[in-house]
Image (cartoon, rainbow, N blue to C red):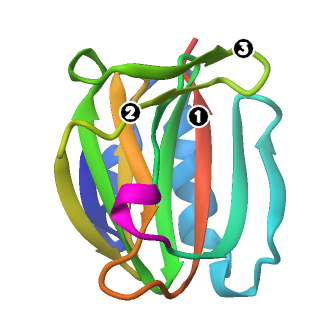
Amino acid sequence: MIFDTAKNLDFYRNLGVEGRYAKAVDFLKNTDLEKLEPGKYEIDGKNVFANVVEYTTIRWEEAKYEAHHNYTDIQYVISGSEIMTYARIDELNEKVPYNDEKDVVFYDNENPGLKAVVKSGEYMIFNPWDGHKPKAAAGEPAPIKKVIVKIKEN
């Protein structure tokens, strides 16, 4: 798990395989994220793509831990803020089995995890071994817009 700000995106350019992180970084740096409408944006086919989402955050207890087997997430907050929580998947209890089609497994909320308030221009990177719980309100539920860049790891 990595927690950082937009000014340091280039530091992560050479992670991963086949220049995929570089493509993700270029997308985040060279796109007017504020103007993006919710939806899916292809960057490099199934290897790198982005999902822009808007929603109202929810209570921490209602948010769900998740993990992905095949993709790393860069969850970048465009506007608003939310609590993102991290816990290693070997410290979580599976609640909903892995769905191969959606590349997601859900866990229960027993682990308090490591919580971070992620604000506009900040992001967290979650690898396949990182359980993560986005969507939690930082205070009262509030609107948020973010982009989740998905990077294929295998």
Comparing 37 with 134, the one in front is 134
Q: Position of residue 49 (x, y in %)?
A: 72, 44
List the residue tagged with mark 3.
100
Q: Is residue 72 left or right of residue 44?
A: left
Q: Which mark is residue 143?
A: none
- The earlier-in-sequence mark between 3 and 2 is 3
Q: Are marks 1 and 2 in contact (CB under 8 Å)?
A: no
Q: Is residue 135 left or right of residue 113?
A: right
The quadrant in which the N terminus is found is top left
Whole-angstrom CA distance, mark 1 to mark 3, is 16 Å
Say which amino acid is labelled 3: Asp
Residue placed at 69% from the left, 67% from the top? 53
- The earlier-in-sequence mark between 1 and 2 is 2
Whole-angstrom CA distance, mark 3 to mark 2, is 19 Å
* Residue 144 appears in view: yes
Q: Which mark is residue 151?
A: 1
User: Given this view, does label 1 or label 2 mark the residue nearer the observer?
Assistant: 2
Q: Is 72 part of what is drawn in magenta?
A: no
List the residue tagged with mark 2.
108
* Residue 1 appears in view: no
- The earlier-in-sequence mark between 1 and 3 is 3
For label 2, the crowd category at 10 Å Cα-Cα, with few meaning under 14, some 14 to 19 and many 20 or more, is some
Say above or below: 22 vs 16.
below
Residue placed at 67% from the left, 81% from the top? 32
Say which amino acid is labelled 1: Ile
Comparing 99 with 96, the one in front is 96
Q: How many marks?
A: 3
Q: Specify the segment rendered in magenta.
A: 58-62
